[in-house]
Amino acid sequence: MLLKKLIKKSKNKFYRTVSSVYDKPLASPTEKEKELIRELKTAFSNLPSLCMTNCSQSEKEWNNNLYRLRELVLNDDPRQFLRWDVILRTMFAAHAGYVFPELKYLRTRLDWNSRWSKAIVESRSGHPIPHWQYPSSSGNLIHHAYHVAQFEEKTKTRVDGMNFIIEFGGGYGSMCRLFYNLGFRGKYIIFDLPEFSALQEFFLKSIGITVCSTDSFNNSKEGAYCVSDLEKLKAIQSNHEEMSNSMFIATWSISEAPIYLRNSILSLISSFKAFLIGYQDQFGEVSNIDFFKNYAVAHSDIKWWDWKIEHLHSENRYMMGQKKNK
C-alpha cells in the first residue's frame, strides 16, 4: 500500500512538472473580466445561507463543498477557479489516469484532425491546468469529449444536429462549451444548484457563449440557460414543443440525486430523442443498475445501450439511447 502511494505521488509530481512547462500565469484582468467577476460575486452574495443541520452525510459533504466554493468566489480571484481545491476535488480531472486511454481513443478516430482536435482546445477561462500529454487541452475537456464520442459512435448521431439540450448537473459548463465547439447551435439548458448555475454563467459568458435570461431564451433560437429552480425548468421546457432533435445529458449527476428529483426530471424528458447518461453502479442504498434498467424497460420506444466503462477503476457505466424510427 505504501509503495502504491509513493508511486502515485511520484507520477503526480511528474505530471505537474511536465504540465508546468506549458502553464502560463494570469494576465491582469480586462474590463470584461472585471464586470463578470462583479456579477459572480454579487450572485453569490445574494444566495441564502446553507442549512447544515438535519442533513444526510452526503448532503453534509456537498454543503461543505458549497460553503468552500462560496468562500473562494467571494475572497479569491474567480479567473482561476479551475485551480481551487473544491473544484479539483469534485469536477475537474487534471491528470486522472483514465484520461490517457480516452485521449488515445479520440486520436484514433477518423475525424480527429478535422473535428475533435479542434473541439478540445482549451480556453483560458478558469485558468485550467494543461494536460501533460496534450497541453493544448485539459484532462476534463478530454474526458467530456470521450463521453460525447462514445455517444456518437453508439447512436451514429452527431450532436451538432441537435437543437435542444437539457443537462442535469453541468459542473462549471464544460460540456455545454464542448457542444458549441463541436458545432451545436441550438438551445442548451443546464439544471444545477444555484452556486453552480452562477459559476456556469460566469464561465460561459467569459468564453463568448450567449447566456440567456428566461424571456430571451424563450424567444431565441440559440443560447445557454442556467437554472436551479425546478418550476422554472418545467415552464421553460413546456414552451418548447418541438423535441424531434432533443437530447438529455447527465454524467454522474442524476445517479446521485434523490429518487423524487430523478423522477421529476425524467418525467420532463420522456419525449426526448437522445440520451447520454453516466452513472455509478450503486449510490448509497440505491442500485442505479436496477433504477436505469427499469427506466429503459418503461421507455421501449428508445433503443438503449448500457455497458460497463472498463477503463474506470470503480464500478461505472454508460447508458445511452436514441429514439427508434417508426
Image: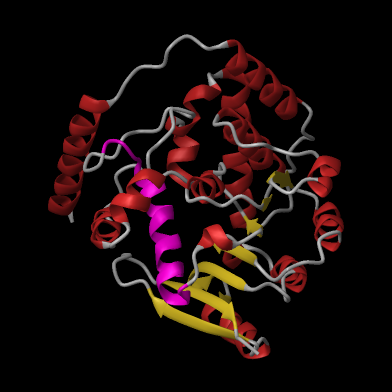
Q: Nearer the viewer, residue 273 or 67?
A: 273
Q: Locate residue 101 relative to residue 297 in the image: left or right.
A: left
Quadrant in the picture for the N terminus: bottom left
How far from the left and from the top, in percent, is residue 306? 46, 80
Question: Looking at the image, which residue is at 34% across and 40% down?
Answer: 137
Front residue of this view, candidates 201 and 322: 322
Q: Tag count in the figure?
A: 0
Task: Indicate the position of residue 97 as horizontal and vertical percent values.
Answer: 26, 53
The structure residue drawn at horizontal position 64% and vertical position 41%, both measured from the top left corner, is 196
| The C terminus lies in quadrant | bottom right
Q: Nearer the viewer, residue 286 or 84?
A: 84
Say whether residue 188 is left or right of residue 203.
right
Give the magenta part as a residue range: 135-156
Does the magenta-highlighted stretch encompass residue 111? no
Tell whether 138 sits left or right of 158: left
Query: In the rendered image of this protein, does residue 100 appear above or below residue 316?
Result: above
**x then y, percent, for residue 64:** 59, 41
Q: Main secondary structure of the magenta part?
A: helix
Residue at the location (62% across, 49% down)?
Answer: 60
Q: Is residue 165 above or below residue 27?
A: below
